Image: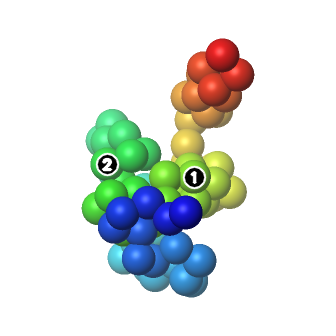
Amino acid sequence: MAEPGSLNNGKPWSAMELDDLERGLRIGVSIEVIADFIMRDVDEVRQKALELGILPKRKQLAKEAFDLV
């Protein structure tokens, strides 16, 4: 089920959304806050950031480690 406020899930990413994602990560905004802001699912935002190479790998590895518990 889609998260509340995830109206843009599955739609093509706009230049503005990509810019918001990149800028947000650069200044230390969490994936969750960015996802809420651009109205997309957290997993979709995380995947796009990984795809673009803008999510620090160590943060992703830490997230995966905690998800396994």
Rendered location of residue 12, percent (x, y):
56, 83
Q: Which residue is mark 1?
A: 43
Q: Residue at x 40, y 57 (%)?
A: 35
- Which element is circle 1 on? helix
Specify whether 50 is left or right of 36. right
Rendered location of residue 64, percent (x, y):
67, 28
Which mark identifies residue 33? 2
> 6 or 54: nearer the eye?
6
Specify whether 51 is left or right of 55. right
Specify whether 20 is left or right of 48. left
Which mark identifies residue 4? none
Q: Is residue 44 above or below residue 55?
A: below
> 38 or 21: nearer the eye?
38
Rendered location of residue 8, percent (x, y):
45, 77
How many numbered discs? 2
Q: Residues within 10 Å of mark 2 (few under 14, many from 20)?
A: few
Q: Is residue 48 above or below residue 67?
A: below
Q: Residue at x 34, y 67 (%)?
A: 5
The Cα atoms of the two marked residues, 2 and 1, are separated by 12 Å
Q: Residues within 10 Å of mark 1 (few under 14, many from 20)?
A: few
Q: Residue at x 57, y 52 (%)?
A: 43
In what quadrant of the picture does the C terminus appear? top right
Q: Quadrant of residue 11?
A: bottom right
**Which amino acid, mark 1?**
Asp
Q: Earlier in the sequence, mark 2 or mark 1?
A: 2
**Which amino acid, mark 2?**
Val
Specify whether 45 is left or right of 67. left
Residue 13 visible in image: yes
